[in-house]
Image (spheres, helix red, strand yellow):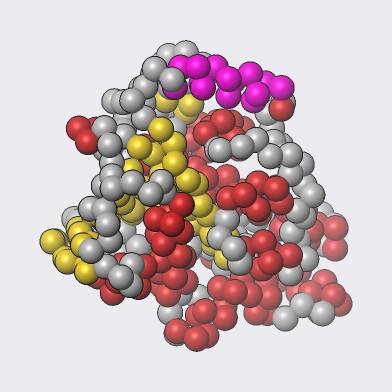
Amino acid sequence: MPWVIGIDEAGYGPNLGPLVQSAVAVQLPESDTAGWKTLKPVVRRCGEKGEPWRLLVDDSKKVYTRGGLEALERAVMIASPSLPATLGEFLMGLTLPWVCGELAGEAWYDAADAIPTTVPLEKLQEERATVGDAWRGIDAAFGPFLAAVTPTPRFNRICDESGSKATVLGRGFVELLGGVLAELPKDDEPMVVTCDKQGGRNFYAGMIQEAFPDGWVIAERESGLESRYRVEMLGRPVTITFRPRADDESVAVALASMVCKYLRELSMKQFNAYWATHVPGIKHTAGYPVDAKRFYAEIQPAMQKLGFTEDQVWRKK
Protein backbone atom coordinates (compact mmCIF):
# COMPACT_ATOMS: atom_id res chain seq x y z
CA MET A 1 0.00 0.00 0.00
CA PRO A 2 1.29 3.49 -0.78
CA TRP A 3 2.51 5.93 1.81
CA VAL A 4 0.42 9.07 1.41
CA ILE A 5 2.16 12.23 2.62
CA GLY A 6 0.18 15.40 3.29
CA ILE A 7 2.07 18.69 3.66
CA ASP A 8 0.62 22.06 4.69
CA GLU A 9 1.47 25.32 6.47
CA ALA A 10 0.01 27.88 8.87
CA GLY A 11 1.24 31.40 9.48
CA TYR A 12 2.72 32.27 6.08
CA GLY A 13 0.80 35.55 5.79
CA PRO A 14 1.19 37.09 9.28
CA ASN A 15 3.86 39.61 10.31
CA LEU A 16 4.15 38.29 13.87
CA GLY A 17 4.84 34.81 15.23
CA PRO A 18 6.31 31.71 13.59
CA LEU A 19 5.62 30.01 10.29
CA VAL A 20 4.63 26.38 10.88
CA GLN A 21 4.83 23.62 8.28
CA SER A 22 4.13 19.94 8.78
CA ALA A 23 4.08 16.61 6.99
CA VAL A 24 1.86 13.68 7.97
CA ALA A 25 2.30 10.17 6.54
CA VAL A 26 -0.59 7.69 6.33
CA GLN A 27 -0.44 4.30 4.65
CA LEU A 28 -3.65 3.88 2.64
CA PRO A 29 -5.05 1.55 -0.03
CA GLU A 30 -4.08 2.44 -3.59
CA SER A 31 -7.78 2.74 -4.42
CA ASP A 32 -8.31 5.46 -1.78
CA THR A 33 -5.26 7.68 -1.41
CA ALA A 34 -7.57 10.55 -0.39
CA GLY A 35 -8.30 8.43 2.68
CA TRP A 36 -11.74 9.69 3.65
CA LYS A 37 -13.57 6.45 2.81
CA THR A 38 -10.97 4.16 4.40
CA LEU A 39 -10.73 6.19 7.61
CA LYS A 40 -14.46 6.87 7.99
CA PRO A 41 -14.80 4.44 10.95
CA VAL A 42 -12.41 6.61 13.00
CA VAL A 43 -12.59 10.03 11.30
CA ARG A 44 -15.46 12.47 10.81
CA ARG A 45 -15.52 15.78 8.97
CA CYS A 46 -17.05 19.08 10.09
CA GLY A 47 -20.85 18.83 10.03
CA GLU A 48 -20.83 15.04 9.90
CA LYS A 49 -22.74 13.16 12.59
CA GLY A 50 -21.50 9.99 14.24
CA GLU A 51 -19.77 8.64 17.31
CA PRO A 52 -18.34 11.58 19.31
CA TRP A 53 -15.01 9.80 19.88
CA ARG A 54 -14.24 9.74 16.15
CA LEU A 55 -11.51 12.22 15.22
CA LEU A 56 -12.73 15.51 13.77
CA VAL A 57 -10.39 15.95 10.79
CA ASP A 58 -10.86 18.63 8.15
CA ASP A 59 -9.39 21.88 6.89
CA SER A 60 -7.90 23.36 10.07
CA LYS A 61 -9.78 26.65 9.66
CA LYS A 62 -13.09 24.78 9.63
CA VAL A 63 -12.12 22.70 12.66
CA TYR A 64 -10.88 25.75 14.60
CA THR A 65 -14.01 27.76 13.75
CA ARG A 66 -16.23 24.86 14.81
CA GLY A 67 -14.46 23.70 17.97
CA GLY A 68 -11.60 26.07 18.80
CA LEU A 69 -8.25 24.93 20.14
CA GLU A 70 -9.86 21.96 21.91
CA ALA A 71 -10.96 20.36 18.64
CA LEU A 72 -7.50 20.79 17.12
CA GLU A 73 -5.74 19.54 20.22
CA ARG A 74 -7.92 16.49 20.64
CA ALA A 75 -7.38 15.24 17.07
CA VAL A 76 -3.66 16.04 16.96
CA MET A 77 -2.92 14.48 20.35
CA ILE A 78 -4.88 11.31 19.60
CA ALA A 79 -3.35 10.86 16.13
CA SER A 80 0.23 11.72 17.12
CA PRO A 81 2.72 8.89 17.77
CA SER A 82 3.00 9.72 21.49
CA LEU A 83 1.19 11.71 24.18
CA PRO A 84 3.69 14.28 25.51
CA ALA A 85 3.49 16.18 28.80
CA THR A 86 5.00 19.49 27.63
CA LEU A 87 5.21 21.52 24.45
CA GLY A 88 8.98 21.08 24.41
CA GLU A 89 8.64 17.29 24.63
CA PHE A 90 6.09 17.34 21.80
CA LEU A 91 8.32 19.45 19.55
CA MET A 92 11.42 17.40 20.36
CA GLY A 93 9.74 14.28 19.00
CA LEU A 94 8.00 16.00 16.09
CA THR A 95 10.19 18.67 14.56
CA LEU A 96 13.20 18.98 12.28
CA PRO A 97 16.56 19.00 14.13
CA TRP A 98 17.09 22.79 14.11
CA VAL A 99 13.66 23.79 15.43
CA CYS A 100 14.12 23.43 19.19
CA GLY A 101 17.42 25.30 19.10
CA GLU A 102 15.86 28.19 17.17
CA LEU A 103 12.88 28.36 19.51
CA ALA A 104 15.13 28.31 22.57
CA GLY A 105 16.36 31.74 21.47
CA GLU A 106 12.84 33.20 21.54
CA ALA A 107 12.02 35.13 24.73
CA TRP A 108 8.34 34.16 24.48
CA TYR A 109 8.91 30.41 24.06
CA ASP A 110 8.33 28.15 27.08
CA ALA A 111 9.28 24.53 26.45
CA ALA A 112 7.94 23.55 29.89
CA ASP A 113 4.40 24.68 29.06
CA ALA A 114 2.12 21.76 29.90
CA ILE A 115 -0.01 20.12 27.22
CA PRO A 116 -2.72 19.18 26.55
CA THR A 117 -4.08 22.63 27.40
CA THR A 118 -7.82 22.12 26.90
CA VAL A 119 -8.59 18.40 27.21
CA PRO A 120 -7.98 16.41 30.44
CA LEU A 121 -5.09 13.99 30.00
CA GLU A 122 -7.13 11.06 31.32
CA LYS A 123 -9.85 11.68 28.74
CA LEU A 124 -7.30 11.83 25.93
CA GLN A 125 -5.76 8.56 27.07
CA GLU A 126 -9.20 6.89 27.04
CA GLU A 127 -10.03 8.26 23.59
CA ARG A 128 -6.64 7.23 22.20
CA ALA A 129 -7.40 3.68 23.37
CA THR A 130 -10.90 3.77 21.82
CA VAL A 131 -9.62 5.07 18.49
CA GLY A 132 -6.77 2.55 18.63
CA ASP A 133 -9.24 -0.33 19.05
CA ALA A 134 -11.31 0.86 16.08
CA TRP A 135 -8.19 1.49 14.01
CA ARG A 136 -7.18 -2.17 14.20
CA GLY A 137 -10.06 -3.04 11.89
CA ILE A 138 -8.97 -0.57 9.21
CA ASP A 139 -6.64 -1.14 6.28
CA ALA A 140 -4.42 1.86 7.10
CA ALA A 141 -1.51 2.91 9.30
CA PHE A 142 0.03 6.13 10.51
CA GLY A 143 3.63 6.83 9.54
CA PRO A 144 5.92 9.65 10.66
CA PHE A 145 4.73 13.13 11.60
CA LEU A 146 7.22 15.97 11.07
CA ALA A 147 7.03 19.74 11.58
CA ALA A 148 9.10 22.85 10.98
CA VAL A 149 8.51 25.89 13.20
CA THR A 150 10.33 28.93 11.80
CA PRO A 151 10.48 31.86 14.23
CA THR A 152 10.83 35.45 13.05
CA PRO A 153 14.65 35.80 13.28
CA ARG A 154 15.25 32.72 11.10
CA PHE A 155 12.45 33.80 8.75
CA ASN A 156 14.13 37.19 8.27
CA ARG A 157 17.60 35.68 7.83
CA ILE A 158 16.38 33.48 4.98
CA CYS A 159 14.55 36.43 3.40
CA ASP A 160 17.75 38.51 3.60
CA GLU A 161 19.77 35.73 1.97
CA SER A 162 17.29 35.01 -0.82
CA GLY A 163 15.27 38.18 -1.22
CA SER A 164 12.00 36.22 -1.08
CA LYS A 165 9.80 34.82 1.66
CA ALA A 166 8.77 32.05 -0.75
CA THR A 167 12.25 30.63 -0.13
CA VAL A 168 11.36 30.16 3.55
CA LEU A 169 8.35 28.09 2.56
CA GLY A 170 10.33 26.17 -0.06
CA ARG A 171 13.19 25.37 2.29
CA GLY A 172 10.80 23.98 4.91
CA PHE A 173 9.06 21.88 2.26
CA VAL A 174 12.37 20.45 1.04
CA GLU A 175 13.48 19.50 4.56
CA LEU A 176 10.12 17.98 5.49
CA LEU A 177 9.98 15.92 2.31
CA GLY A 178 13.51 14.61 2.77
CA GLY A 179 12.87 13.96 6.46
CA VAL A 180 9.73 11.93 5.81
CA LEU A 181 11.46 9.81 3.16
CA ALA A 182 14.28 9.07 5.61
CA GLU A 183 11.83 8.01 8.34
CA LEU A 184 9.56 5.80 6.24
CA PRO A 185 10.04 2.02 6.55
CA LYS A 186 12.68 0.74 4.14
CA ASP A 187 10.18 -0.87 1.81
CA ASP A 188 9.44 -0.27 -1.86
CA GLU A 189 5.90 1.01 -1.37
CA PRO A 190 4.98 4.07 -3.45
CA MET A 191 5.22 7.51 -1.84
CA VAL A 192 2.30 9.74 -2.84
CA VAL A 193 2.76 13.36 -1.75
CA THR A 194 -0.06 15.90 -1.83
CA CYS A 195 0.40 19.55 -0.93
CA ASP A 196 -1.41 22.85 -1.19
CA LYS A 197 -0.06 25.21 -3.82
CA GLN A 198 2.94 27.01 -2.33
CA GLY A 199 2.66 30.79 -2.51
CA GLY A 200 0.64 30.68 -5.73
CA ARG A 201 3.43 29.04 -7.72
CA ASN A 202 2.92 26.55 -10.56
CA PHE A 203 6.51 25.33 -11.05
CA TYR A 204 8.19 23.15 -8.40
CA ALA A 205 10.67 20.90 -10.21
CA GLY A 206 13.74 22.69 -8.84
CA MET A 207 12.46 22.55 -5.28
CA ILE A 208 11.67 18.84 -5.58
CA GLN A 209 15.09 18.13 -7.07
CA GLU A 210 16.65 19.81 -4.04
CA ALA A 211 14.64 17.53 -1.76
CA PHE A 212 15.71 14.43 -3.69
CA PRO A 213 19.22 15.10 -5.04
CA ASP A 214 19.66 11.44 -6.00
CA GLY A 215 16.39 11.31 -7.94
CA TRP A 216 15.32 12.31 -11.44
CA VAL A 217 12.40 14.77 -11.38
CA ILE A 218 9.92 14.65 -14.28
CA ALA A 219 7.17 17.27 -14.61
CA GLU A 220 3.92 15.65 -15.75
CA ARG A 221 1.72 18.74 -15.50
CA GLU A 222 2.25 22.36 -14.42
CA SER A 223 -0.84 24.56 -14.33
CA GLY A 224 -2.96 26.68 -12.03
CA LEU A 225 -5.22 23.72 -11.30
CA GLU A 226 -2.50 21.18 -10.59
CA SER A 227 1.26 20.73 -10.70
CA ARG A 228 2.22 17.05 -10.75
CA TYR A 229 5.65 15.40 -10.75
CA ARG A 230 7.18 11.98 -10.48
CA VAL A 231 10.64 11.24 -9.12
CA GLU A 232 12.56 8.24 -10.43
CA MET A 233 15.72 6.44 -9.25
CA LEU A 234 14.82 6.58 -5.54
CA GLY A 235 14.14 2.89 -4.88
CA ARG A 236 10.39 3.49 -4.65
CA PRO A 237 7.86 5.24 -6.93
CA VAL A 238 7.37 8.86 -5.84
CA THR A 239 4.67 11.23 -7.09
CA ILE A 240 4.17 14.79 -5.84
CA THR A 241 1.06 16.83 -6.57
CA PHE A 242 0.33 20.46 -5.68
CA ARG A 243 -3.32 21.55 -5.74
CA PRO A 244 -5.31 24.49 -4.38
CA ARG A 245 -7.36 23.46 -1.33
CA ALA A 246 -5.65 20.10 -1.05
CA ASP A 247 -6.70 19.90 2.61
CA ASP A 248 -10.29 19.45 1.45
CA GLU A 249 -9.40 16.49 -0.78
CA SER A 250 -6.88 14.57 1.33
CA VAL A 251 -7.15 13.37 4.92
CA ALA A 252 -3.33 13.47 5.23
CA VAL A 253 -3.19 17.12 4.13
CA ALA A 254 -6.12 18.00 6.39
CA LEU A 255 -4.38 16.44 9.38
CA ALA A 256 -1.12 18.20 8.46
CA SER A 257 -3.02 21.49 8.34
CA MET A 258 -4.38 20.78 11.83
CA VAL A 259 -0.91 20.03 13.22
CA CYS A 260 0.27 23.35 11.76
CA LYS A 261 -2.68 25.32 13.11
CA TYR A 262 -2.35 23.72 16.56
CA LEU A 263 1.35 24.57 16.86
CA ARG A 264 0.79 28.07 15.48
CA GLU A 265 -2.01 28.71 18.01
CA LEU A 266 0.09 27.43 20.93
CA SER A 267 2.98 29.63 19.76
CA MET A 268 0.79 32.73 19.50
CA LYS A 269 -0.70 32.01 22.92
CA GLN A 270 2.82 32.09 24.39
CA PHE A 271 3.81 35.11 22.27
CA ASN A 272 0.80 37.11 23.49
CA ALA A 273 1.29 36.03 27.10
CA TYR A 274 4.93 37.16 27.03
CA TRP A 275 4.15 40.64 25.73
CA ALA A 276 1.17 41.00 28.09
CA THR A 277 3.58 40.73 31.02
CA HIS A 278 5.50 43.74 29.66
CA VAL A 279 2.54 45.71 28.26
CA PRO A 280 -0.33 45.13 30.73
CA GLY A 281 -3.77 45.21 29.15
CA ILE A 282 -2.57 44.82 25.57
CA LYS A 283 -5.13 43.15 23.32
CA HIS A 284 -3.95 39.82 21.95
CA THR A 285 -3.15 39.48 18.25
CA ALA A 286 -3.27 36.66 15.70
CA GLY A 287 -0.36 38.37 13.92
CA TYR A 288 -2.07 39.17 10.63
CA PRO A 289 -1.03 42.40 8.86
CA VAL A 290 -3.57 45.06 9.94
CA ASP A 291 -3.80 44.05 13.60
CA ALA A 292 -0.10 43.17 13.70
CA LYS A 293 0.74 46.84 13.04
CA ARG A 294 -1.42 47.88 16.00
CA PHE A 295 0.19 45.31 18.28
CA TYR A 296 3.72 46.11 17.11
CA ALA A 297 3.19 49.84 17.73
CA GLU A 298 1.96 49.14 21.26
CA ILE A 299 4.96 46.98 22.20
CA GLN A 300 7.56 49.39 20.80
CA PRO A 301 8.41 51.02 24.17
CA ALA A 302 8.76 47.59 25.81
CA MET A 303 10.91 46.35 22.92
CA GLN A 304 13.30 49.26 23.33
CA LYS A 305 13.47 48.76 27.09
CA LEU A 306 14.12 45.01 26.70
CA GLY A 307 16.66 45.46 23.90
CA PHE A 308 14.72 43.80 21.07
CA THR A 309 15.51 44.68 17.47
CA GLU A 310 12.89 44.84 14.73
CA ASP A 311 14.34 41.72 13.07
CA GLN A 312 13.65 39.71 16.22
CA VAL A 313 9.93 40.49 16.28
CA TRP A 314 8.62 41.77 12.93
CA ARG A 315 8.76 39.78 9.72
CA LYS A 316 10.14 41.76 6.82
CA LYS A 317 7.87 40.16 4.24
Residue under the image location 69 percent in, 36 percent down = 116
Q: Is residue 135 left or right of residue 98?
A: left
Q: Residue at x 21, y 62 (%)?
A: 232
* On-image quarter of the N terminus: top left
Residue 57: % across, % down: 44, 32
Residue 61 seen in the figure: no
Residue 127 in magenta?
yes
Q: Point out the residue furthest to the left here.
A: 220
Seen at 71% across and 27% down, the residue is: 121
Residue in the image at 72% along x and 81% along y: 309
Q: Is residue 225 magenta?
A: no
> Where is residue 115, by image quadrant?
top right
Looking at the picture, how far across and down is residue 126, in whole percent?
63, 18
Q: Determine whether 209 is above or below 160 in the image.
A: above
The answer to whether any part of residue 191 appears in the image is: yes
Magenta span: 122-135
| Occupied quadrant, residue 308 | bottom right
- How many labels, in total? 0
Q: Is residue 29 above or below residue 241?
A: above
Q: Is residue 288 above or below residue 265?
A: below
Q: Magenta residues: mostly which secondary structure?
A: helix
Q: Position of residue 26 (x, y in %)?
A: 39, 39
Q: Is residue 232 above or below residue 266?
A: below
